[in-house]
Image (cartoon, coloured by chain):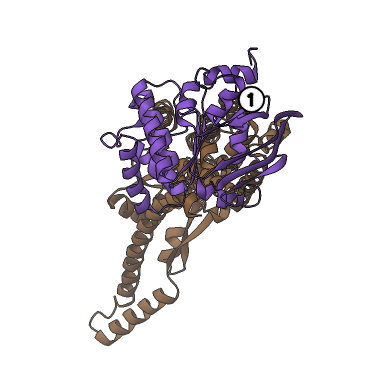
Amino acid sequence: METYLEAEGLTKYFDGVAAVEDVSFVIRRKEIFGLLGPNGAGKTTTIRMLSTVLAPDAGDVCVGGHSVIREGDEVRKRIGICPQELALYPELSAVDNLVFFGRMAGLSGHEAKARARAVLVGVGLEARGSEVVKKYSGGMQRRVNIGIALMNRPELLFLDEPTVGIDPQSRNHIFETVLALRAEGTTVLYTTHYMEEADRLCDRIGVMDRGRIVAVGTPAELKRQVGDPDRTTLEEVFLHLTGRSLRD
Amino acid sequence: MVRSFHLARFELRRYLAHRSDLAFGIALPVVLFSLMVVALGSDAKFRGVMHVADLDGGSLANQVLERVENADGVTVRRYTQDELADALERTAVSTGFVIPPGFSASVESGAPASIVVKSRGSGGDEGRFVTGIVQGALRAAASEIELRRVAGVLAGDPANDARLDEAVRQALAGARTRPPVTVVTESMRLREASQLDRLLAGIVVMFLLFSGTLGARALIEERRTGTLERLMTTRLSAGELFAGKLLAGIGRVVLQSFVLLGLAFAVLGTAGPVVFLQCLVLAIVVAAAVTSIGLVIAAVARTEEQAAFSAVVLTMFMSVFGGTFLPTSGTGWLDVLARFTLNKYATDAFVGLFGEAATLADQSAELVILGAVAILGLAAARMMFRVSSSAV
């Protein structure tokens, strides 16, 4: 399979402390790549570097053939970000949020409105798109959060814990949306603390701990490192790789 | 740059959607203005008053004053010379008229004479209006005088039509080349306005500063919620983001200025649309300055609380020491402190425009200083601006 993203020796220090150190991995085109790790493992910092928000202190990332350091604008054309927090404007409607971020992504006014309508259908909010977001349930807000990331038809979609704090129906809808996006050709980087979610969705998984990648493989390959893949859960693999001590 | 304008438009929509911001930025000053007007009183209606010191007291002077008093919308208020000078000095009067001693006798003897108009700046709309009425009254009086003189010349030979025509022609030609009565304007550039002028200007500037600097809190909130970071993963460049935020800040403050100045003008009553437009232009410069200060706060503060605290402390410091509530003395350490506040220059400029009937050109020094604050503040904020506040 063709490589779409290649991170090589990514390193980032904050106040002299390494948040991410010498991280290298690849994501193949049209795959769902899970990035797992305990709190503070460096997942979000890694995503920030992959998405051009943070400049790495060392290393580089190539996205669709473009360096995040030298060709940031080319990279930003190709990516969509759904951050862990609800990064939207709750006092405005879902349509307003989608159109605004669409315009910022380079769509014309007409294109942004048309795309917003399509995205609202995709995230199951076509009937309530004109309502202000703060009146939505948590699950609906999460779906708008994802919808914003889809406005520019990204080739690579970053989903940072998109299912935190929502009901099973909304979670299931998000799963279906992600699988549909992959079927359409979108590459996805997915982070989550729910191991069964990663097991169900991800084609391959990278496990991070203390700023480093400690394992990469398919769920079955990772389980095989610990025991019988049919009997071992991904959570057992995770605890085996990252330890049982509590993290800050 | 198109994205910057779109971002600015979007920001303004968000501002209008925030009821608490609107209440603070617009409703609160409206209430405050109302209280001030009740407390201090004001001339809310347009009144054309001829403030005059009649040092002549002759028949022609009386005739002119009577004609003015009979004109619609104008009343005559008489002063002694010292009283009028004092009223002009205190800015209780923006335009005063002095009829010099010997005025009537001089005109009646055929010698030219003048009424002196003393005005603060252009004298304002009221001053110009009343001056026009006085000039009309003088012209009418002068015509009568000329006719009386002609009649006097012809009194001994009333049947001679040829002499009558010649006398009228000569009299009118003489009146055209050497008018028997004229109005001489003396413009006074005084630097003191009424207490209400200064208070209104000061309150306007204080609220603009509050809005501009508290805008920093909204920016930090965006940083906290992640929308700022999300914007930076779109095609929007950092420069466009910054320009959009600046434009939005200016737009917000100008919108607020429009309401506050409208209110101030309604209270003051005498200023016209030209002065209002000049004040709006000044408000744009002030908006740029206060927005840039807000962006500096956003660049330096790490939390919304820090930003709000900085905004309130800075605004109150500048309002107190910048002459919002009391004019700075011009000497001493308080005046030195005032020079480090944006309010001093902004308030002085606003007072100059609607309190002293000056023009924008008269306020060029203040405009240059406010513009410099805007440019330097923006440069500093741009250098220190961070998209992300955390290292996670």
Foreground pick, B78 / B260:
B260
- Residue to which mark 1 is pinned: A41
**Residue B140 visible (yes or no):** yes
Question: Which residue: 60% across, 25% down?
Answer: B306
Q: Where residue A207 appears, x then y in whole percent?
A: 61, 27
Quarter containing the C terminus of chain B: top right
Foreground pick, B202 / B138:
B202
Left or right, residue A181 beside residue B384: left
**Residue B55 visible (yes or no):** no
Of all residues, the one furthest to the right in this rendering is A16
Q: Quadrant of residue B177?
A: bottom left
Of all residues, the one furthest to the bottom in this rendering is B162
Q: SS for tag 1?
A: loop
Asked if B217 appears above or below B357 in the picture, the reply is above
Q: Where residue A31 appears, x then y in whole percent?
A: 49, 40
Of all residues, the one furthest to the top in this rendering is A245
Asked if B327 appears above or below B111 in the picture, the reply is above
Amino acid type, label 1: Ala
Foreground pick, A170 / B385:
A170
Task: Pinpoint the chain carrying mark 1.
Answer: A
Q: Where residue B328 appears, x then y in whole percent?
A: 63, 34
Specify the chain shown as brown.
Answer: B
Foreground pick, B311 / A138:
A138
Specify the chain shown as purple.
Answer: A
